[in-house]
């Protein structure tokens, strides 16, 4: 018969599980997890009663002989602990049996351990200043606490002191100065770190956790660690592991991970306030000088060392960096333009495809027309490729952004060794991010519910993440539909353009190379006569209508004043359910090895939206249409049944020390299962050898797998002229892009040759050998095999830290996007399929202009696996030196390189990483009484950025950040005056991204009031 407490805890855990995981489909796994939660809570509730004892004392700063507040006092091997107050005093109540060890720790001081054998007088502890923290403890590398010096993989840590001293505007920006980290800034509110190459703005390969909760917005496919993560006041530390971490953390961690750890309300109590006012756009080039503000508040309170809570709120608003690079990625020397007409170069390029312009997408094969049958320089049957005029991003995207963060947590210590907690996190944000298209995020809301039970040798957690994209919209269909509804469809527009161009030639003695540029400008102006012009009331009203319509179809408008049906709204909702647990069994296996085991389960629930995700059980023609009710579209559109994407896994890690703990060996094996793919095993082997107690050498071999993310696996983006589709094979059923398509590159070459020969069917058939059948492979998980060596040491009496690592990676089945062309109703290789590949918007009214009966082609941008294997390698060196008193100089240099393949792949993988980058810092946290400063110089060299949206050269740049801080000890506060990119050296970090300038700020912090 069950004990009453056991029944109660079982019911509580079942109720919590049902709330967090209402759609869990595996009963056996569900009840196994429920049983584990119940047993853990039951054992906590039934722990044997022990008499309560009190330990009190005082902690001082030995150097200044002054009380030291905010020192953590923890019973070693338990969750029980407290902090010192403003007088340096502490009082600790515990049921632990004597003797036990107290651990005293504080940022900037050397940790101390004190064994308590008996009750008596108050304890007196003097903390010794430690300028460089060479013996920090990290948990991310092995999922267990360990010295950073003896981590089996490269790992970096930003602690509270480093965060306070950074000249970056906030702690997340400070990640850019960490060894090996490359930051991609899409918005003030949206920043994504990456390590060791293959960078993209929505980084599927780099995981971001906050207290164990994955910050990936599932359907958007972007990590939002800085947008919905901790506030400046609640962040405790950030740990970054460059390189594969899949063996312990599973999917989405093959390039690395960032683990953001927040403050525990037991250890950090009181009221804290933060406010920052800054200014950016000081040069007025992209926008008038603008004010940025950010405020945060935190309150935490503990009761009798048993119950504690914390509440955080933060709000930021400002004017975003603008994406306004007016470069052409389709210059006239390319085959996709008009290389035969030198006069159409530069600003006269009729096939212009701007970096930050939309609706002129020549390289994607949309928004273009082939104007055939022209006579130029006396030559008949000439063809021009002409793009629609399109709209600049600055006209389509509001620069105003805001970010609201709210979170609260309840913590309860069930026993001396077990702590339960529940936390809720809410984030609302605006911004811009880039994947296949640019997306304007507006009122995006992500919520997290997180339940955790943690002991000294186990942790069980479950969480649910809820996502709603609010009023967001897709910039490309907005531009397409603005052109369509104000300037006519492409066929009508092309006819106006051609008629005007031909008339210009008649009025000027014929079209020639000398007058072709002027003729183009005249013809474009005539074709654009009714086009909505930015800044006019008509443009604004039309834009507002389009971004409110949830339909990305680019409709053909043949009737004047017909109702607008094509829109740009991004309406996505999803839920992610996750549960995981780990158990350190070392006390049972200590005689042989230390053993850690764990398991996790994750389910994504996608609500079809009609544009990005659909119900694949519905017929193809119905997938993007709402479910009709009594023949009408209901107020709340329903696009079919919800779609589920699942993943389950588990791991075991063994460690063993030899030779008086000089050598430590690690071995781990992970198993992952996704019902869409074959199961995968992921191993990691590592060794750390310590020579002469100071020199630590590490060697690591590991593999990792990455299942396609939601957008890569299941997307079905009905984006009008180019559909974007996921990698799972059943999405292809009835569409044919895997087995019945031509590659985009071959179609471009084919059309260049056909256009040069008059754009006729005969010319097409004569050049059919230029077309290459895609034969896309069946999707499989992406795999990485990695080998890493490293060295880390603290020398010169704890004044010099040296950290160096080198790695080599091999990627197989690399996941990326390729664009292909499917002949409608025809089979590749046939005459009809060849003719269907001629530019769809060609002028078919001209004699010899082609077969008017051709159905043309469908264009798909497909997530698929590369056929080649890719190898990259690199190294990073970090040095920190306290060379005189409190003066510290530090820096790092990073090298990353991809080895070229002998043969081209089906798509460009996009290494997107500078070969060299470096950071140098110089500072003194107390150059005068209560005054400190820090200066950081950062440089990276130029590199090529490749992506489906924009490809181009990113120039080398350098920046200078600096800050001066004045501390106010009476209120435990500070004033920081600083600037990021102090010299306002304008730069971009990726092609299509924003131009980043200087940001100057003053920040006020008051910490720990009302304790």
Image: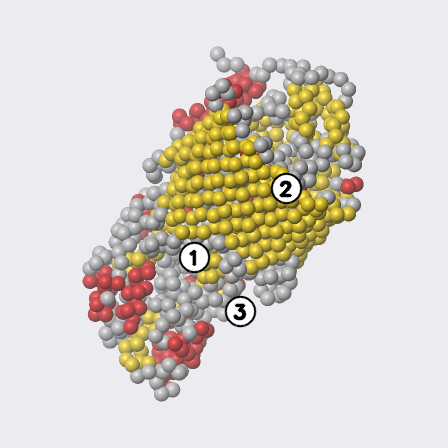
**Judging from the image, what secondary structure is the residue with disc 3 in?**
loop
Residue 253 visible in this rendered orientation of the protein: no
Graded by Cα atoms within 10 Å as few (under 14), some (14 to 19) or many (20 or more), the crowding at tag 2 reads many
Label 2 close to label 1 by CB (< 8 Å) = no
Residue, disc 1? 946
Residue drawn at 69 percent across, 37 percent down: 130
Vertical placement of residue 716 versus 790, above or below: below
**Marks 2 and 1, how far apart at CA:** 39 Å
Instruction: Return the residue nearer the eye: 892 or 552.
Output: 892
Residue drawn at 76 percent across, 28 percent down: 58
Graded by Cα atoms within 10 Å as few (under 14), some (14 to 19) or many (20 or more), the crowding at tag 1 reads many
Residue drawn at 23 percent across, 60 percent down: 833
Which circle's residue, 2 or 3, is located before the other in the chain? 3
Residue, disc 3? 536
Instruction: Return the residue nearer the eye: 888 or 545.
Output: 888
Which one is closest to the eye, mark 2 or mark 1? 2
**Judging from the image, what secondary structure is the residue with disc 1 in?**
loop
Say left or right for 571 vs 456.
left
């Amino acid at each position: 018969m069950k004990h009453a407490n056991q029944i109660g805890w079982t019911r509580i855990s079942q109720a919590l599980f049902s709330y967090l995981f209402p759609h869990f489909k595996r009963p056996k796994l569900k009840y196994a997890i429920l049983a584990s939660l119940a047993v853990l809570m039951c054992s906590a509730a039934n722990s044997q009663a022990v008499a309560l004892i009190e330990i009190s004392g005082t902690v001082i700063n030995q150097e200044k002989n002054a009380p030291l507040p905010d020192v953590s006092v923890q019973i070693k091997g338990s969750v029980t602990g407290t902090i010192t107050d403003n007088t340096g005093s502490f009082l600790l109540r515990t049921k632990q049996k004597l003797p036990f060890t107290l651990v005293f720790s504080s940022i900037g001081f050397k940790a101390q351990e004190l064994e308590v054998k008996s009750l008596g007088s108050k304890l007196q502890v003097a903390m010794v200043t430690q300028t460089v923290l060479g013996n920090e403890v990290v948990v991310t590398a092995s999922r267990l606490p360990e010295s950073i010096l003896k981590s089996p993989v490269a790992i970096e840590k930003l602690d509270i002191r480093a965060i306070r001293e950074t000249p970056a505007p906030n702690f997340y920006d400070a990640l850019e100065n960490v060894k090996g980290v490359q930051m991609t800034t899409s918005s003030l509110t949206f920043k994504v770190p990456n390590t060791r190459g293959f960078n993209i703005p929505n980084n599927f390969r780099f995981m971001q956790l906050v207290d164990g909760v994955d910050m990936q917005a599932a359907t958007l496919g972007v990590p939002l660690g800085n947008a919905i993560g901790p506030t400046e006041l609640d962040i405790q530390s950030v740990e970054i592991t460059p390189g594969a971490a899949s063996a312990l953390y599973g999917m989405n961690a093959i390039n690395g991970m960032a683990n953001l750890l927040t403050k525990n309300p037991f250890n950090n109590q009181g009221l804290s306030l933060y406010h920052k006012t800054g200014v950016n756009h000081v040069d007025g080039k992209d926008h008038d000088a603008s004010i940025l503000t950010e405020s945060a508040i935190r309150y935490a309170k503990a009761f009798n060392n048993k119950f504690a809570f914390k509440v955080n709120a933060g709000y930021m608003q400002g004017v975003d960096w603008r994406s306004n690079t007016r470069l052409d990625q389709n210059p006239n020397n390319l085959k996709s333009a008009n290389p035969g007409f030198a006069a159409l170069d530069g600003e006269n390029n009729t096939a212009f495809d701007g970096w930050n312009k939309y609706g002129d997408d020549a390289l994607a094969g949309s928004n273009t027309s082939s104007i055939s049958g022209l006579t130029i320089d006396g030559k008949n049957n000439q063809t021009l490729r002409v793009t629609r005029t399109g709209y600049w991003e600055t006209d389509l995207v509001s620069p105003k952004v805001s970010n609201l963060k709210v979170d609260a947590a309840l913590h309860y210590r069930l026993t001396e060794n077990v702590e339960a907690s529940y936390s809720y996190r809410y984030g609302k944000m605006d911004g811009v991010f880039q994947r296949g298209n640019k997306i304007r995020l507006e009122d995006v809301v992500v919520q997290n519910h997180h339940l955790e039970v943690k002991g000294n040798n186990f942790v069980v957690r479950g969480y649910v993440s809820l996502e709603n994209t609010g009023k967001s919209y897709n910039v490309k269909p907005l531009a397409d539909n603005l052109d369509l509804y104000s300037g006519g469809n492409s066929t009508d527009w092309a006819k106006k353009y051609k008629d005007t161009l031909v008339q210009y030639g008649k009025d000027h003695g014929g079209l020639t190379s000398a007058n072709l540029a002027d003729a183009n400008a005249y013809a474009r102006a005539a074709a654009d006569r009714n086009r909505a012009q930015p800044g006019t009331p008509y443009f604004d009203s039309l834009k507002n209508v389009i971004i409110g319509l949830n339909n990305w179809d680019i409709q053909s408008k043949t009737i004047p004043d017909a109702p607008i049906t094509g829109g740009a709204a991004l309406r996505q909702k999803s839920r992610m359910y996750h549960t995981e647990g780990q158990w350190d069994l070392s006390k049972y296996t200590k005689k042989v090895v230390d053993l850690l085991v764990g398991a996790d389960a994750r389910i994504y629930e996608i609500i079809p939206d009609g544009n990005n995700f659909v119900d694949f059980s519905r017929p193809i023609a119905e997938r993007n249409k709402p479910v009709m009710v009594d023949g009408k579209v209901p107020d709340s559109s329903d696009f079919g049944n919800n779609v589920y994407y699942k993943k389950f896994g588990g791991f075991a890690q063994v460690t063993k020390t030899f030779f008086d703990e000089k050598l430590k060996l690690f071995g781990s094996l992970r198993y992952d299962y996704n019902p869409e793919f074959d199961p995968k095993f992921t191993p990691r082997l590592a060794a750390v050898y310590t020579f002469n107690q100071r020199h630590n050498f590490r060697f690591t071999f590991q593999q990792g797998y990455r299942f396609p993310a939601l957008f890569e696996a299941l997307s079905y983006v009905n984006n009008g002229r180019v559909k974007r589709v996921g990698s799972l094979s059943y999405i292809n059923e009835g569409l044919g892009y895997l087995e019945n398509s031509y590659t985009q590159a071959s179609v471009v070459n084919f059309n260049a040759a056909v256009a040069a020969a008059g754009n006729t069917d005969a010319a097409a058939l004569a050049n059919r050998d230029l077309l290459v059948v895609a034969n896309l492979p069946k999707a499989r998980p992406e795999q990485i095999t990695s080998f890493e060596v490293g060295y880390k040491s603290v020398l010169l009496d704890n004044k010099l830290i040296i950290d160096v690592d080198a790695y080599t990676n091999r990627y197989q089945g690399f996941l990326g996007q390729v664009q292909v062309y499917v002949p409608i109703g025809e089979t590749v290789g046939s005459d009809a399929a060849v003719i269907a590949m001629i530019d769809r918007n060609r002028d078919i009214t001209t004699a010899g202009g082609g077969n008017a009966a051709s159905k043309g082609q469908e264009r798909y941008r497909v997530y698929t696996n590369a056929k080649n294997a890719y190898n990259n390698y690199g190294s990073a060196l970090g040095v920190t030196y306290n060379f005189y008193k409190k003066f510290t100089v530090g820096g790092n240099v990073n090298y990353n390189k991809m080895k070229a393949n002998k043969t081209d792949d089906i798509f460009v993988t996009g290494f997107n990483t500078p070969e060299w980058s470096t950071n140098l810092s110089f500072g003194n946290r107390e150059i005068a009484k209560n005054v400190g400063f820090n200066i950081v110089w950062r440089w990276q060299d130029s590199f090529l950025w490749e992506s489906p949206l924009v490809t181009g050269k990113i120039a080398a740049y350098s920046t200078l950040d600096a800050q001066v801080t004045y501390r106010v000890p009476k209120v435990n506060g500070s004033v920081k005056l600083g600037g990021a990119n102090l010299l306002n050296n304008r730069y971009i970090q990726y092609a299509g991204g924003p131009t980043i300038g200087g940001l100057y700020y003053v920040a006020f912090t008051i910490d720990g009031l009302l304790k």
